Image (spheres, rainbow, N blue to C red):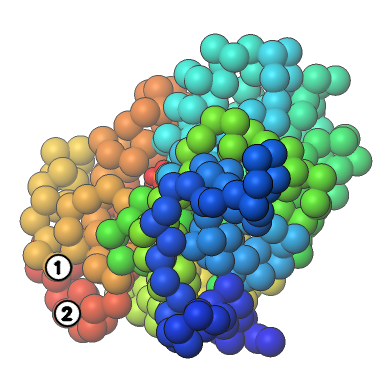
Amino acid sequence: MKFRTRAIHVGNAPDPQTGAVIPPIHLSSTFVQPGAGEWGKFDYSRSGNPTRSAVQETLASLEGGCGALAFSSGMAATHCASMLMGAGDHLIAGMDIYGGSYRLFHRVCATAGIEVSLVDLQRPESLAAAVRPETKMLWLEGIGNPRLTIPDLPALAATAHELDLLVAVDNTFATPALMRPLELGADIVMHSATKYLAGHSDCLAGVLAVKSPELLDRLYFLQNATGAVLSPFECFLLGRGLKTLDLRMREQSRTAMKIAQFLEGHAGVKSVLYPGLASHPDHARASQLLDGGFGAMITFEANCDFEATKRIVASTRLFRLAVSLGAVESLIEQPATMSHASYDAAARQQAGITDSLIRLSVGLEDVDDLIADLDAVLS
Ligand SMILES: Cc1ncc(COP(=O)(O)O)c(C=O)c1O
């Protein structure tokens, strides 16, 4: 079955008891056992729940994994993956990762004795240079945040595997509709499913998908032991969002391309970063690794200072000033004060997150209305 068909049918069999086309949401926290000390398919909802199993089946199919786990947030999923490491281990992460991942690695993993190095993955030689005998994992984003860099995942994964590292990819920006990291060499895919996967800004969720059953068992153990599972109702919302993921990603990518072209020619704009533009440093790689669109995130530098940038992001009418991304409504934000505020100032500068950088999450509104909204505040 093709991607779109799997998004609708895998994990979504009609209810055998009632024939309901949409399976019921199983809210039960506990399940009757066949006998004392005997276990059925489900016993307690932290360990397993039918609604969660269903959406996990869909997610695994879309990412091309052997299994997936649904978490209460993207950060809970990232934290669970980080628990594969322990005191004395070393993690290498890309320089332009989400601010919350930066904070988790530097302020939570560090207190557990895990050392973190941020490296510029645009220079592939920097990976081997940063590796130590105790390095266990490489963490990167399929589309970097917020400069929309596209690392050479197949090459980085091959190097990392030669060095015996696990490769984990945050695939939030690309989604499996455009990129499937497990097929490109990653061992673990992580999602803030809060974003495109659920797609409607009404649900906080996280995902890990893997291709090795052994890794799935280890992550399942950690998730069950620590407890950050996704609730049944959120599982339903996530599964509902997945059914239109491919359609949304393609349409939002098309709109984003038109907006990026508009911005590139605008006097109020210094530079535009969008992987679909020939001017993007990673455009050629984006064309190779992304399939069906270049994503719906655009980053641009306004032709003005910090204060004027703050005024711009607060003045659009349709683009709402809010963190997060990936939903049907368009959002605007200033990474320096919002999504990447948890970076320290030096790391922000090194990652190219300037004061006048603006990040757009392009939604499903009419492209002409979105362009008029931006034109009004930039002119
Ligand atoms: C790229 C990326 N990864 C991870 C996260 C964290 O996900 P959550 O907010 O669902 O915990 C976010 C949230 O903005 C994100 O943008």
| Residue 105, percent from left and from top | 54, 26
Answer yes or no: do the residues labelled 2 and 1 have beta carbons within 8 Å? yes
Badge 1 amino acid: Leu
Q: What residue sits 15% from the left and 76% below the top?
A: 372
Among the 4 quarters of the image, the one containing residue 162? top right
Is residue 275 visible to the viewer in this orientation of the structure? no
Position above or below: 363 against 1? above
Residue at 43% in and 80% down: 22
**Mark 2: amino acid:** Asp
Residue at the image point whose x is 60% and y is 77% from the top: 10
In the displayed orientation, state which residue is furthest to the right: 162
Q: In the depicted view, which residue is nearer to us: 282 or 325?
A: 325
Question: Which residue matches tag 2?
Answer: 369
Q: Is residue 82 shown left or right of residue 195?
A: right
For label 1, the crowd category at 10 Å Cα-Cα, with few meaning under 14, some 14 to 19 and many 20 or more, is some
Quadrant of res 325: bottom left
Q: Residue 280's x, y, as percent?
A: 52, 62
Asked if one can make out residue 327 in the rendered structure from this viewpoint, the answer is yes
Q: Is residue 294 left or right of residue 2?
A: left
Q: What mark, if any, has residue 318 been given in the picture?
A: 1
> Outermost residue toward the front?
35
Please determine whether, in this image, residue 295 is positioned above or below residue 254.
Answer: above
Query: How many angstroms separate mark 2 from mark 1 (CA)?
Result: 8 Å
Image x and y of residue 101, in percent: 49, 35
Which quadrant is the C terminus positioned in? Answer: bottom left
Using the image as rendered, state which of residue 103 and residue 272 is in the foreground: 103
Give the answer, above or below, for where 290 lies relative to 104. Answer: below
Where is the N terminus found, in terms of image quarters? bottom right
